[in-house]
Amino acid sequence: MSSSTSSSSSFSSSSSSFSSSLSSSSAPRSLAPYGWDAAWEAEFAPYAAQGLLPGRVVRVDRGQCDVVTAEGLVRADTAFVTPHDPLRVICAGDWAAVERDGTPRYVRAYLPRRTAFVRSTSSKRSEGQILAANVDHAVIAVSLAGELDLGRIERFLALAWESGAQPLVVLTKADLVPDPVGLSYLVQDVETTAPGVQVLPVSSATGEGVDVLAAVVTGGTSVLLGVSGAGKSTLANALLGEDAMAVQAIRDVDGKGRHTTTTRNLLLLPGGGVLIDTPGLRGVGMWDAGTGVGHVFSEIEELAEECRFHDCAHQAEPGCAVLAAVEAGTLPERRLDSYRKLLRENRHIVAKTNARLRVEMRKEWKRRGAEGRAAMEAKRGRAR
């Protein structure tokens, strides 16, 4: 296999400023700050026997990647770890086995992932996209510059729980909500949307909450997620204590802006731990996240156990505890609508690669169609 020479020069120029802080002249003596531990070392043993060098992938772009090793920063070709399955391509956060020399060097393999954050590239396609690997915390950045989109937060949370990471919602630009009472209500709204998840208001401009966030992410690997304009790069700079990430101006009228980060970058935090910054996501498609949806809507799942029928769809069935909670006002109808929507979307995505589920869904559609026709016939009969 040969490397892509044309892409090499553009990758080199676009990442020079990012790579400077990780150059071989400042090579770390140990990979421990990047998350290397005895378990990873044991996993790597077969590759060490082959003379390969362990390292963590900090950036991937156009068939090449930057890998931080005990010898410093290494640029390597990914031709050997670029399969047809998009979920198996190497990404930021992976632990790689790299050749010790050669021009170019190659990544020969990567270790099995402990966690992986995956989304669907489009709800109309069955392709998944892996955004980060071996992550402990999924930090979901939500801007307070505009109206809160609780449904989008629920999507991010479902994927975060499914990844195996611990979610954390960070409400950025808190300084734009000067009223403490108003800010408190916004935090409560998100806490209701995110049961079991810490919700932290933060202002990169004033420093409010940054120290608390830094303490949470210390010692592990965190991935920073959110849509364009959420303030991720500014937040990353605040955590790093330097302007490592470029920041675009955001329109005051609606809080929107262009993508600042264009690749996923793994950055070493000064207080310990590493941060993976990601580009702003235009879409957050579900990807086999049924368990994650259950975590996000845990109160609905608990209510469902009290329904009369074990397969209750919470639509119009008698003895439905979920509908009773909506009627009583203890469960917001918006939550139930969002729950149904995410389950439908996730089921649709999974069915594209699961023949048995496709058959079950067709049977369900036929049954509902027959019930609908029977109801219409009965209605016509009464009208006569």
Image (cartoon, rainbow, N blue to C red):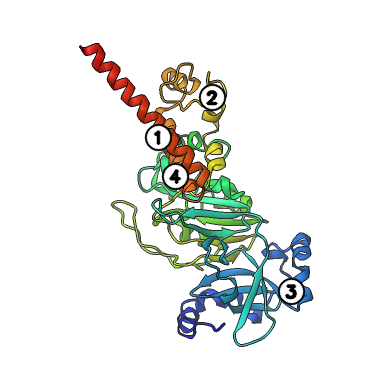
Q: CA separation, marks 1 and 4?
A: 13 Å
Three-letter code, disc 1 = Trp
Q: Which residue is mark 4?
A: 348
Give percent across and percent down for residue 122: 41, 54
Q: Earlier in the sequence, mark 3 or mark 4?
A: 3
Q: Quadrant of residue 38?
A: bottom right
Q: CA separation, marks 2 and 4?
A: 24 Å
Q: Earlier in the sequence, mark 2 or mark 4?
A: 2
Q: What secondary structure is marked by label 4? A: helix
Q: Earlier in the sequence, mark 1 or mark 4?
A: 4
Three-letter code, disc 2 = Leu
Q: Earlier in the sequence, mark 3 or mark 1?
A: 3
Quick one: label 1, few (<14), some, or many (20+) residues within 10 Å? Answer: few
Q: What secondary structure is marked by label 2? A: helix
Q: Which residue is mark 2?
A: 303
Drawn side of residue 202 relative to residue 102, left or right: left
Q: Earlier in the sequence, mark 2 or mark 3?
A: 3
Where 236 falls versus 98 (above or below)?
above
Q: How many circles with numbers are drawn on the protein?
A: 4
Quick one: label 4, few (<14), some, or many (20+) residues within 10 Å? Answer: many
Q: CA separation, marks 3 and 4?
A: 48 Å
Q: Quadrant of residue 367?
A: top left
Q: Which residue is mark 3?
A: 29
Instruction: Identify which residue is drawn at 34% across, 59% down.
Output: 257
Three-letter code, disc 3 = Arg
Question: Mark 2–mark 3 contact, CB under 8 Å?
Answer: no
